[in-house]
Image: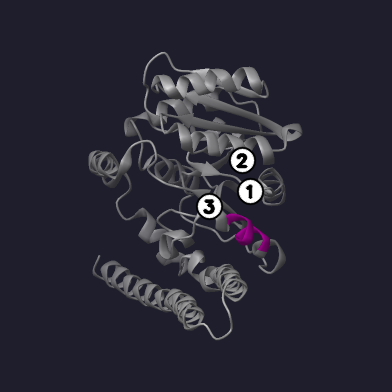
Amino acid sequence: MISVIVPIYNAVEDVKLCVASLEAYFDWAQGEVLLIDDGSGEETKKYLHTLAQRCPQFKVLFNQENLGFVKTCNRGMKLASGEIVVLLNSDTMIPANFTKSITSFFANHPTVGIASPISSCSISSVAARQGIQADDLVALNQWLHRQHVPTYPLMPAAEGFCFCVRAEVLAEIGELDEIYGKGYHEERDFSYRAVQSGWQVALIDDMCVYHKRHASFGEAQRKVQIEKNNPTFMERWGGFEYGWMAERNWSNPIDNICQDLLTPVYKQKIKKWLVAIYRCMSPSCRQRQDMMKLARQSYLRQQQIIGLLQAAQYRQERIMTAQLGQG
């Protein structure tokens, strides 16, 4: 059984999209969904009250006061009844294969305690590099299932947007550390503690979940939280991640599938653009030719960006190697 916990703080339009995807694609026979409001405004609360009446399969809870992201997650995890607990951000949208992908992965990988799927918008994700949008989600997941052979590579830490953890791990190492307050670094801290206890962390690389990012707080408040939590995190973990990567000669697994993953998505977009152009304009129309040229240039720019990012990743790895050598 899987328990999905969605902490909510305002951004009601994003919450609606997240809920709609859960309502459509979550396998209710395999688990539960807890929506926990953390002191949102009246508009969000009104929506959640209405949802609770319309869709009783959702367990809708309200904090009496704003507790912050981490405490809200911990509240949900204490109430969860599933063997797998998923902390899902409220600005995400899940794909059709969500429940099956997660449950099957953990069933087949008993040494993995924590995992996260590919994100459409996070620091180590494909879309942070290429600008993938919500309407690409179906094409991405179709390609992953038809063409990509998953390897479920190990990682030093899972991503917080869709943080999947065994209840067994929670029982062993405890909950998220509430010293991180409203959030940032809490998932990495938890991942590192699990790794130290002998568990593995992995990427579920046969599923992509859309993540808008920073919907509740915005970029400015995000930076404030990161600066606030950085000293605590660095004091605890310092070079832990670099050491983990160096021991395994590790490289970001997203980089290995980035180009293959993006190619069908953008080819599909180019094809749609070209079909629309041919339908709307005569063969002799100069404007049609100009639009075809722009479409091809857009695709080529995507390929150029991939090359630049791969080069940047290589330079970053060399810098990290040099720093480790000096240490």
Label 1 Cα crowd, 10 Å radius (few <14 / some 14-19 / many 20+):
many
Q: Which residues are magenta?
A: 137-142
Pointer 2 with pointer 1, Cβ within 8 A: yes
Residue 95, labelled with which disc?
1
- Residue 21 shows which numbered tag? 2
| Residue topped by disc 3 | 134
Residue 163 placement, left or right of 326: right
Image location (x, y in percent) of residue 219: 29, 45
| Amino acid type at mark 1 | Pro
Vertical relation: 38 (above or below) 260: above
Quadrant of the image for the N terminus?
top right
Q: Residue at x 68, y 47 (%)?
A: 96
Amino acid type, label 2: Ser
Mark 3 belongs to which amino acid?
Ala
CA separation in Å, label 3 and label 1: 10 Å
Q: Residues within 10 Å of mark 2 (few under 14, many from 20)?
A: some
